[in-house]
Amino acid sequence: MCLGGFLASCYLGIAAIARARDECERAIAMAFSSSATESIISKRNRAIVSALGKHLSFDPKNFPAESIREHDIKDLFLNILKLSENGSLLKNKDQVMNWIEYANSFPVEPEAFHAMLKRFNEDLIQSSVLLGDGLKPSEADIVVFSALHSFVNKEDFGEVFEKISVEKSTIDSQVSKLAENLEKLEVDPSAKKGSQGSKIVDKLEVDSTSSSNRSVPAKKATGDVKASEEKKQPQKESVEKDTETSVSLLNIQVGVIRKAWKHPSADSLLVEEIDLGNGNVRQVVSGLAKYCTPEEMTNRHVVLITNVKPGKLRDVMSAGLVLCASNQDHTVVEPLLPPEAATIGEHISFSGHEGKPEDVLNPKKKQLEKITPHLYTDGSGIATYKGIPFMTSAGPCRSSIPNAGIK
């Protein structure tokens, strides 16, 4: 063999070894990734079984080991209900199952998960529990937070927070002394009982008065009253602001587009005839002509706001607003998609926001403009209001565009 042939053989051999090494590294990375995912899911399911065992009064040891490895939280939960004596007493089952669907959609990828967690955390600022009267966690709370706990590492805050020492009230100690002295009087039935009791009481009143005078001057008390009155006004304004931005003001329903055509005098607009069930059909004008054809819109299920004030858009009457998701530069826009099994005309619900919607939104109050910044899809494409899913009787509404704004 000549020198050139020998060198060519060497280079080919080296290239083959490099390719084999790269393939091996990829296989190892995939194996570790799969193993990590399996570990998270297994840890998540064990946490759910353990927490629900305490809540529903059943022994987690009796739960089949093979079900722990199931990826679907819904199946896991239904199996737990079968084993529990209290499973048949489950309240708000539909709403609980909706939240379980939400927990089941948590992304495993760290970046997508942290984005979802951030939005979920923002919403929890205003809520103590996901379902119920705000005092006792429901099955939905237990499942969702057990699932979250499997992803989130515990942090040791050490000495980050300053310790606050609390001194015992002077009044409390005086009351304790009075109680002790009264007990002594009850034991001694002498004629001096009344005078001793009155002296003790008089002494307590004097001590309490002097203590109060030392700790709370008259001027300071007057200032505190004024300060409390000043605080009431901002609190009232804050409540009014929360009411104005609550999604419960919107009447959002599931509809199906029966007909769609181009607007006669605007290239960017489409006109849709939308069926809301029970003979309720509305004409809506949408700015979707650049993104969807009339053929693509026909027979499509959509989510729309039905209590916007009716008005004309380029001389064509519109009585609704089709909600759409769009990426940041608005190059991709699509209507939100409710589940196929959702009932036509049913109202979209948001857990924790069960208020009555406005009959007709007031454009002067700009209610819609204040609410829509809080509408977006999460990392899995689920439509949310401040992280709370758009829920129907068949599950959440979705979009193929994750982390998108909704308008």
Image (tube, helix red, strand yellow):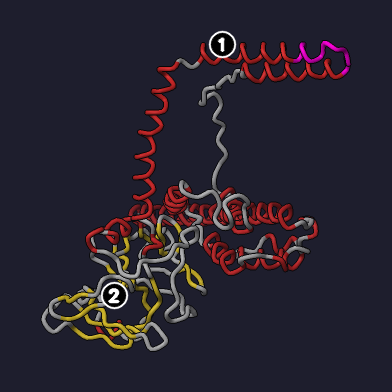
* Residue segment shown in magenta: 187-197
> In this picture, is 116 found above or below 358?
above
Callout 2 amino acid: Gly
Dot 2: what SS? loop
Q: Is residue 404 visible?
A: yes
The quarter holding residue 194 reads top right
Residue position marked by numbered label 2 in the rendering? 320
Mark 1 and mark 2: span between their CA atoms? 69 Å
The quarter holding residue 208 reads top right
Residue position marked by numbered label 1 in the rendering? 210
Q: Nearer the observer, disc 1 or disc 2?
A: 1
Relative depth, front residue between 71 and 317: 317
The local crowd at label 2, few if under 14, some if 14 to 19, many if 20 or more residues have their Cα within 10 Å, is many
> In this picture, is 208 found above or below 393?
above
Where is residue 371? Give x, y as percent. Answer: 33, 58
**Residue sticking out furthest to the front:** 191
Quadrant (top left/top right/bottom left/bottom right) for the C terminus:
bottom left
> In this picture, is 239 found above or below 388?
above
The disc placed on residue 329 is none
Where is residue 188? Give x, y as percent. Answer: 88, 14
189 is within the stretch colored magenta: yes
Callout 1 amino acid: Ser
Residue sitting at 33 percent across and 60 percent down?
404
Relative depth, front residue between 271 and 129: 129
